Image (tube, rainbow, N blue to C red):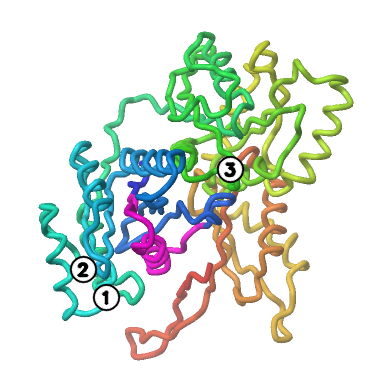
Amino acid sequence: MPEPIVAIIGRPNVGKSTLFNRIVRSSTAIVEDIPGVTRDRIYRRAEWEGRGFVVVDTGGLFPEADEDLLRQTREQTVFAIEEADLVVVLFDGKEGLTETDREIVDMLRRVQKDALYVVNKIDAHTKEERLFDFYRLGVGELIPLSAATGYGFAEFMEKVIQRLPRREAPEPTGRDLPRVAIVGKPNVGKSTLVNSLLGKERMIVSAEPGTTRDSVDSICRYYGREYIIIDTAGIRRKSKVGYSLERFMVVRALRSIERADVVLLLIDAREGISEQDQRIAGLVNGYGKGLIVLFNKWDAVEEPERRLKELAREFSWKLHFVDFAPFLTVSGLSRKRVTKVFPLIDEIMKERRKRIPTPELNRLIPQVSGKLPLHRGRRVKILYVTQTGIEPPTFVLFVNFPEAFKPEHIRFVERVIRQRHTFKGTPLRILVRQRRKTATTGRGGGVAARDVCRDVS
C-alpha cells in the first residue's frame, strides 16, 4: 500500500526545512535519495518506530509578495494540504502569532484535514509560555518543539505516528491484475498512449505540458488479460519544479511508481534520452519496479533505421544502469506497435516472481570467486547465496569479509546471475551479509559452533 504523506506547511522562516531535515536524519531506516527531486529537498521517505511515511517540505506563504508569486505559493500550500494524510502546521514561537498563521488555520478548517499544530523555536521548558499567544487560534493541542536543538522532538514524532492512517491491505478479489504506470517528462505523449492502449478517449489530451495533474487508473483488456493502467503527471526537471502545484505533480507521479508493478518510461524518439529521463529511470530502479522504455512518436521520426541505431547506442550509454530493461519504438498517435507492450509486461511480471533454488545459485559461486579481491592478505569468499524475496528478486550473499565487498563486485555478481537466469525487465536486490561462528555450550558441557548472520548491507 502507498505510504502516508506528511506535509509540513507554514509561512516563511518558521523552521519547516529544519524540521524536515531532523525528521529525515532521525529516521531509523536508511533514507533513499530520489534522483532529481531531493536536491530540492521537497520529498523524502522516512521511518519512525517501524512506521514508514513520506515527508513533504513546502514553500512558505509570503504575506508581502507580488500577485503572481503569492498566487503560486498559496496554490502550492493548498495542494499540499489536499495531498497529505497529515498536515504539520508550524508556527514561529519567537515571533508570535501573525495574520498569515490565521489564514493557514482557516484554510485547514475549510478542508477539514487532520493536522498537528506545532510551535517551533521553543528549546526549553521555561520557554513554553510562548504557546499562550497561539491558543487564540482555537486549535486545541499545541506541541512545543525546537527543530534546531531537538527539544520535544521525540514527543512530536510519537504524535505524528499516532495520527498517521493505518492502511490495511485490501481484501482479496481473486483478480491479481498487473499495475502499469506510464511516466515521463511532460508532453511526451503519455495520455495519448493510454488512449491507444484502452482503445478509447479516456484521458484529456492537450499539447500544453502538464495537462494531467492527477494519477488516473483505468482497466485495460488485451486478449482476455486485464491490466490496471496508471497515467501520471509528467515529471519535470528540478529547475522547472518551482513554488507551484507542479512540485506536487511530482509527488503524485512518484506515488504512482510506488504503486506499480511495471513502469513504462516514455521518451520522445525525436529528442532522445535526456538527463531527466535518466533520473526517472533511476527512480524506477530505486523503487525496484519492472521497467520498459518506450521511444514514442515514432511516426514523426525521419530515417527510422538510422534513428533506431542511434537510440540503441544512446540507451547503452545513458541508461546502462537499467540495461536489463527492454525498449520498443511506438507511436501512441498511430497506435503503431503499442500492443507489443502487453507480452512484455506479462514476461516481466513472471520474471519478477521467479525464484531460483539455492543449490542452483551456489553453482554460480565458482564463476565469481576468482574475481574477488584480497582482504588483509586473505581471499574474499562467497560462502553461499540464497534468494530471499521476489518483486523485486532479492538475493543474499553470505561472505567472510563483507567490508571488502564493493559495489563493483555486487554488479559483477548481478551480471553472473543474469547471464544464467536473465530476470528481464526487473531490477535485482543483492545484499551482503557476514556468516561467522560463535561458541555455545552443548548438552555435555562442551562447546558447539553455530552460525550467526549479521546484516552489513
Based on the picture, tell me whether residue 24 belongs to the magenta stretch: yes
Q: Image point 26% across, 47% down: which residue? A: 104
Contact? badges 1 and 2 (CB < 8 Å):
yes
Of 231 and 389, nearer the camera is 231
Residue range of the region highlighted in magenta in the rendering = 6-32
Q: Are marks 3 and 2 in contact (CB under 8 Å)?
A: no
How many numbered discs? Answer: 3
Image quadrant where residue 50 sits: bottom left
At horizontal 24% and vertical 73% (from top left) the residue drawn is 122
Q: Nearer the viewer, residue 422 or 232?
A: 232
Residue 85: % across, % down: 28, 44
Q: Is residue 351 visible?
A: yes
Q: CA distance from mark 3 to mark 2?
A: 36 Å
| Residue marked by disc 2 | 144
- Tell me which numbered mark, 3 or 2, is placed earlier along the sequence: 2
Residue 341 position (above or below residue 79): above
> Are there few (<14), some (14-19), or many (20+) residues within 10 Å of tag 2?
many
Q: Which residue is mark 1?
A: 151
Name the residue type under label 1: Tyr
Residue carrying label 3: 240
Residue 255 visible to the viewer: no
Q: Return the disc, 1 or 2, that comes first in the chain's sequence.
A: 2
Q: Is residue 182 left or right of residue 11?
A: right
* Residue 17 part of the magenta-drawn span: yes
Q: Give 385 or 54, whichever is nearer the viewer.
A: 54
Give the structural element (helix, strand or loop) at label 2. Answer: strand
Rendering coords of residue 285 (x, y %): 59, 46
Horizontal and vertical percent for residue 244? 46, 41
Which element carries disc 3, helix, strand or loop?
A: helix
